[in-house]
Amino acid sequence: MTEATTVPALPATRADPPLPGPPAGPRPAPPGAWAASAAFGWRALLKIRHVPEQLFDVIAIPVVFTLMFTYLFGGALAGSPGRYLQFILPGTLVMAVLLVTMYAGVGLNTDVSSGISERFRALPIWRPAPIAGALLGDIARYLLAGGLVIVFGAAIGFRPAGGAPGVLAGLGLLLVFALSLSWAWTALGLLLRTPQAVMSAGTVVLFPLTLASNVFVSPQTMPGWLQAFVNVNPVSHLVTAERGLIAGQAAPGEVAWVLLAAAALAAVFAPLTAWLYGGKR
Amino acid sequence: MSIAEASAAAAARHHAPPGGAALAIEAAGLVKRFGATPALAGVDLAVAPGTVYGLLGPNGAGKTTTVRILATLLAPGGGTATVAGFDVAAQSAAVRRRIALAGQAATVDQDLTGAENLILLGRLAGLGRKAARARAAELLAGFGLGKPAARQVKTYSGGMRRRLDLAASLIVAAEVYFLDEPTTGLDPASRAQVHQIVRSIAAAGATVLLTTQYLEEADQLAGRIAVIDHGTVIAEGTPGQLKASAGGGVLRIRLADPAQRADAGPVLSRLLGVPVQAGTDPAALTATIPASPSGRPASERAAAAVTELARCGIAVGEFALGQPSLDEVFLALTSSTGSGNAREATS
């Protein structure tokens, strides 16, 4: 007679000390917009520390591509692996950081689907703070990913002609573009149901864009239809701008193109993200 | 904080005495639809400050939707609600400064450690760095989470996670606590701990709105209960009133020999004057004994019925007279409207 069993009122068995209740005294004033965002930024940094495999899994792909292309095809493509490395590394740098941007959407989706965003939304905080804080964490993640690829490249013989200023300028431009692209993933993260779906959608978009670009070879030898695509591919423009900056010979037109594309991405997807996040009421 | 806000807050803090106008939670005609699905079809609630109020109902009845509207997570589709004196739609920021919420899913970050979760939420509640750390350590120790505090929450058991979740809602003081099914899926020991937590919140003078699927739980913790089904409150009152509405008690009998069930049913039915239900257990029989107009206690009539079975040569293995289960309260409450059979439809 299972349906007849009642839940017994359990006595506090051992002489347990009483559990803590709410604190006495008034509630502190809620944090300001910056303090709340900084708290979420701290959370994002903790996540990098606790789940580093999320970052390394993604960086592994461009690193493997760099090794494979440089040592297998480098000689054939550019005369020697060393010379080819100077060509491919800015490309795989872009690939690494762009792949990491997906996690902006994955992280936000995880928050929403796990229910923790409900707790955040019931707090007396600046409403966009969770997203602003996550972007602070993203900056750290992108710089870490970019820095790791540069260090890896330097270890196998990459020698940027632009020196440290060129590399810093390259990382800076890449960071701007990556942050703008992050908004597309956060919007997608709020639209799709599961973190896995965001991941798949991100992969489906990013892999063709990074492969059918000038990351690995310059498009002159490609068939016309592919050349046409590669030439309008935003990733190609970004890679060209990066190659210029890192070599110390910035192409102002390409840099301007990338900045415009970044502005356009942010202008569309940042408001969309804000609307989707606030509008789920 | 406006003057009106400040004075309303002061009134709520001083827990306006019964009869005073200020209710901790007041809802009138709350309506919410999700697409074509009506989730709430007019919910009214009145919760006095400093009390534990139970919102009782099956899955899909509208409990969580009600809590989400009151906690400002969801805009009401119609109707109005105030929490701690502030309108949930027009003054949501003021409401959020006075509430604490523990959601149905354990809403803590699985990737972070227990301590990091509480420090983060302490910072977000407005505590300084040091105060957030101190409060986190205090709560972790108090809830028996001192040892696993440095482990990621994904390694915690369900009970540990729920305790952490409740600890997170106790970081700073709130006037109104929303606890959405805080014991669902917990083992009895963890459940007893959660009950203790609810009592400690109530002892501090705060108001608790507790949702649950278990009548026993609401019975033990809540001073008043609203039974919610199909998005409306179908009954409201003290636990005793609700149980009375479902009859005097439920007699559950298990026969020694299942083959005798066919004979036992009519005997019981004749003696008690009510239909007897045969459960899925082939030896079981259940009868809801109505409150008797003559005032003869249900226990006496149950005992007489069991004696009669023995006289007829039907051996009774076990029998019990209990309070009605939630199911039985529900059947009693919904039988008049005929909606009792359809309540799975909205879940």
Image: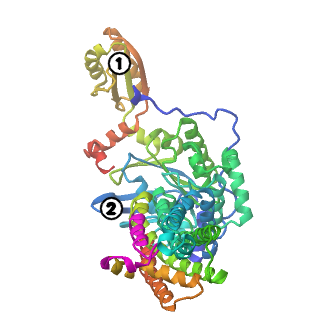
Which quadrant of the view contains residue B188?
A: top right
Magenta segment: A201-225
Which quadrant of the view contains residue B79?
A: bottom left
Q: Is residue A33 above or below residue B290?
A: below
* Residue located at (40% from left, 35% from top): B325
Which labelled disc corresponds to residue B34? Answer: 2
Front residue (pair B1, A165): A165
Q: Secondary structure at mark 2?
A: strand
Front tag of 2 and 1? 2
Front residue (pair A241, B337): A241
Residue A21 appears at what percent x and percent y? 65, 51
Which labelled disc corresponds to residue B305? Answer: 1
Q: Quadrant of the C terminus of chain A?
A: bottom left
Residue B250 appears at what percent x and percent y? 38, 29
Q: Quadrant of the N terminus of chain A?
A: top left
Separation of disc 2 and disc 1 at Cα? Answer: 49 Å
Residue B229 appears at what percent x and percent y? 35, 49
Front residue (pair A275, B325): A275
**Number of dots carrying numbers:** 2
Q: Main secondary structure of the magenta part?
A: helix
Left or right: B303 as drawn, with respect to B341: right
Left or right: B110 as drawn, with respect to A206: right
Residue B225 appears at what percent x and percent y? 45, 48
Q: Amino acid at mark 1?
A: Ala
